Image (cartoon, grey):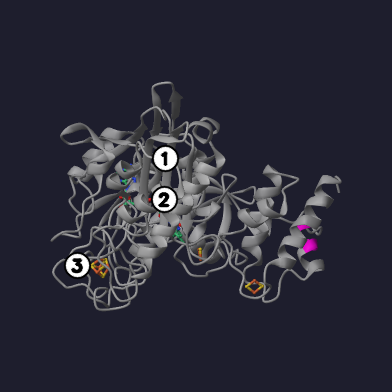
Amino acid sequence: MREIRYLSVAAEGPAIRALQADTDATYLAGGTSLLDLMKLEVLNFAQLVDVNAIPLTKIEVSNDGARIGSMVRNSDLALHPEIAARYPLLSEALLSGASPQIRNMATVGGNLLQRTRCYYYRDPSTACNKRNPGSGCAAIDGYNRNHAILGTSDHCIATHASDMCVALAALDAVVHTQGPGGERHIPFAEFHRLPGDHPEIESVLQHGELITAVSLPPPTGLRQSRYLKIRDRASYAFALSAVAAALRIEGNLIRGARIALGGVGTKPWRAVEAEQALVGKPANRATFTLAAAETVRGARTRPHNAFKVELTRRAVVRALSTIRGAS
Amino acid sequence: MATDLIPLGDPSLRQKVRLELVVNEERRDLVIDGYKSLLELLREELQLTGTKHGCELGECGACAVLLDGQLVLSCLVAAVECDGRSVQTVEGMQNGPTLHPLQSCFADAGAAQCGYCTPGFLLAAKELLERKPDATRAEIAEALSGQLCRCTGYLQIFEAVEAAAAQLRGGR
Ligand SMILES: Cc1cc2nc3c(=O)[nH]c(=O)nc-3n(C[C@H](O)[C@H](O)[C@H](O)COP(=O)(O)OP(=O)(O)OC[C@H]3O[C@@H](n4cnc5c(N)ncnc54)[C@H](O)[C@@H]3O)c2cc1C
Ligand code: SF4
Ligand code: FES
Ligand code: FES
């Protein structure tokens, strides 16, 4: 039997010091991505530092933007009236994820760092570079239906499974941290790492760095938005492909656009080229179709996930058309 | 109480830990193996076996309980996280010999077949109706979406919740 130590802390300082003192320790928030994987012996930490008592639970919304404490529960964030009014894309993405029970437990910080749902990653009897660096990737030659088509490497093709993060990517969020080296403010696009040669390293966080908050700039021109999630059943399933889109349309011309994708990238995927293909163009189906093609340009498919290319194109067109229809 | 126990705060999860929590409105003072989940605490330490072991991975809802009034999955809550907190399980739903309206409506509507999923559904529905006494069918379906049932096909469950909601609104 393995020994696991447990420590509950009520402030940031002691949390960070506890991790600094032990390279085999990790933070425990809602536990919905950590405790299941510890039961499966995919993750084997020697110490859990429970951060649930740290009061990073505020949601502040003003004309300058929003600041969301890292311990805010996914359900509280999704249902917060000002978040729902000013950042409906974020609420919609959150409510499309998991189940009410899990959203009650899941925190913002934990959601950012949730582990992939690659079946092989979750099964310690298989080869997996993310779980066991250097062991190979069972998914590349195996069953890869839920795997990524964008941002993959020869070492890992696992998706980042979060819905919330897709909205945060589209909304230009910033992740705020506190760590042994002080505070950091990390632009969302830089927070998650591509797998490359080291799929086991998923973000730029250093050991012991604690996520304290996520902030959002004012939602200027982004209120017409849509989170469209395509999955195997209508609720309680991870995305096969998901689109977070926002448009600012003036007259018939697109003046601003944001597009991010979920379920298809090895990290929450911002589709900058597709946004550029939209701006200045008429808001019609022809434009949307061109932009949709941009989102999957460079996609690298595998035997079982090639369907995601067309699925994603169509999802992008549908999300943009829905926004257009509502505006 | 033995004195050589490691106090809460720096226990090793292999060792015994001492917890004080309220379960179904009754204070409990426990000394348990530190590695246990809340689910195991309820079933193995308190013999409250109404809460079910399902997937153990957050996927099925069989283990759902109310923790400080919030619906959570007890298989993914470490027991050591529950010191000082309040838990409600299916055993706490009835009032003496009288079933909770949700319980009687589940029985009347045939909303349980094997019954394995029922405790989780009852608590999820209870939490919903306390928050939204006139929840719509869509809101009921959404609130119960993390509870899986392999027998009933869900229709009877939705009908039972609606019937119970009507009874509860009627002040019965
Ligand atoms: C059955 C099931 C279905 C799901 N479906 C979906 C879905 O459809 N869409 C979706 O988006 N998600 C889904 N999820 C995932 C869920 O959203 C995540 O598990 C959850 O957001 C993780 O948050 P947590 O607080 O529970 O994290 P934890 O499990 O506590 O932690 C996860 C990781 O984050 C680290 N961590 C936590 N907080 C901090 C912090 N403040 N600073 C630094 N590190 C930290 C932990 O050390 C750990 O490594 C599902 C989960 C389950 C079990
Ligand atoms: S895709 Fe990544 S997570 Fe899945 S088996 Fe390959 S290396 Fe592991
Ligand atoms: S046993 Fe907890 S969700 Fe299945
Ligand atoms: S009654 Fe059998 S699982 Fe629901």
Q: Is residue A323 left or right of residue A53?
A: right
User: Which residue was labeled with disc 3?
Assistant: A129
User: Which residue was labeled with disc 1?
Assistant: A282
Is label 2 on the same chain as label 3?
yes
Q: Nearer the viewer, residue B145 or A47?
A: B145
Q: Marks 1 and 3: CB-CB under 8 Å?
A: no
| Chief SS of the magenta region | helix
Disc ID at residue B81? none
For the magenta stretch, what is the residue range? B101-105
Disc ID at residue A286? 2
Quick check: is the Cβ at mark 3 less than 8 Å away from ligand 2? yes
Residue type, label 3: Asn
Question: Which chain does tag 3 point to?
Answer: A
- Tell me residue B69's x, y (percent): 60, 45
- Give the SS element for disc 3: loop
Q: Disc 1 versus disc 2: distance between alpha carbons?
A: 9 Å
Q: Disc 2 versus disc 3: distance between alpha carbons?
A: 41 Å
Q: Is residue A324 magenta?
A: no
User: Which circle, 2 or 3, is nearer the viewer?
Assistant: 2
